Amino acid sequence: MFARQVARQVRTYATSASTLHGQPSPGLSGKYAGALFTAAAKKGGDALKKVQADLEAVHKTITAEPTIQDFLSNPVLSSGDKSKGIDELLMRSKATGSDLTKNFLEVLAENGRLYQADKTIADFLEIMSAHRGEVKVTITTAQPLEKDLQKRLEDSLKQSSLAGSGKTLVIENKVNEAVLGGLIVDFGDKSVDLSVASKVNKLNAALQESV
């Protein structure tokens, strides 16, 4: 039931969503990420893969180490301290695959944007995902999906126009007890809300209007 209902609503939005999904953020972090992608693509070979591997490692280090987070968010560091901090970050991350990675972080430092490093990395990884033809679909439920239902949902989504020619769906199940029941499917800038919480909210709104 859910699988067919989701597939029908996905078809309604798939065309517009497919043109938007995977685009970098319009802000500065997106511009820096786009510039890094272009530089790596021009370098050719496996430069893109090396930069991606480096940045994935850097992201893990940033997430795991509060001292690195403090370093990135410190606005009063000298140029020398920033350079030492970047070297330390790359060493802890074992991110030595590409000189572009260090250059990228140095540019952020020079422009006072180190605090946006993690967001810029996320934007770059999103661009890489789109480059590989991936379309991310997030299914949010109150409890983890049962394997049978998840497979039926995945099959329905893969048969929809969302999975266009050359596209690969990357489906993730997130758990949020606030949805109460049912599910929410997010893809691109679109959302299909089939949650119990949504129905309760609509009912509450209708009751308030009738008072």
Image: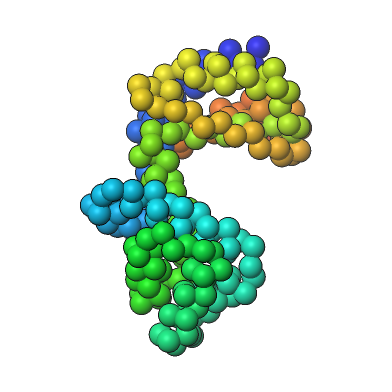
* Residue found farthest to the left: 42
Count of marks overlaid on the render: 0
Q: Is residue 82 above or below residue 136?
A: below
Residue 135 as seen in the image, left or right of residue 5: left
- Could you say which quadrant of the image residue 171 lies in? top right
Q: Is residue 161 above or below residue 31?
A: above
Residue 7 on image: x %, y %: 53, 17
Does residue 207 show up? no
Residue in view at x 62 percent, y 74 percent: 67
- Could you say which quadrant of the image residue 16 lies in? top left
Residue in view at x 37 percent, y 60 percent: 98
Does residue 51 show up? yes
Q: How are the residues colored?
A: rainbow
If the image is split into quadrants, where does the C terminus sit? top right
If the image is split into quadrants, where does the N terminus sit? top right
Residue 162 on image: x %, y %: 43, 23
Viewer-proximal residue, 188 or 48?
Answer: 48
Residue in view at x 41 percent, y 85 percent: 79
- Could you say which quadrant of the image residue 62 lies in? bottom right
Residue in view at x 50 percent, y 54 percent: 56
Residue 15 on image: x %, y %: 38, 25
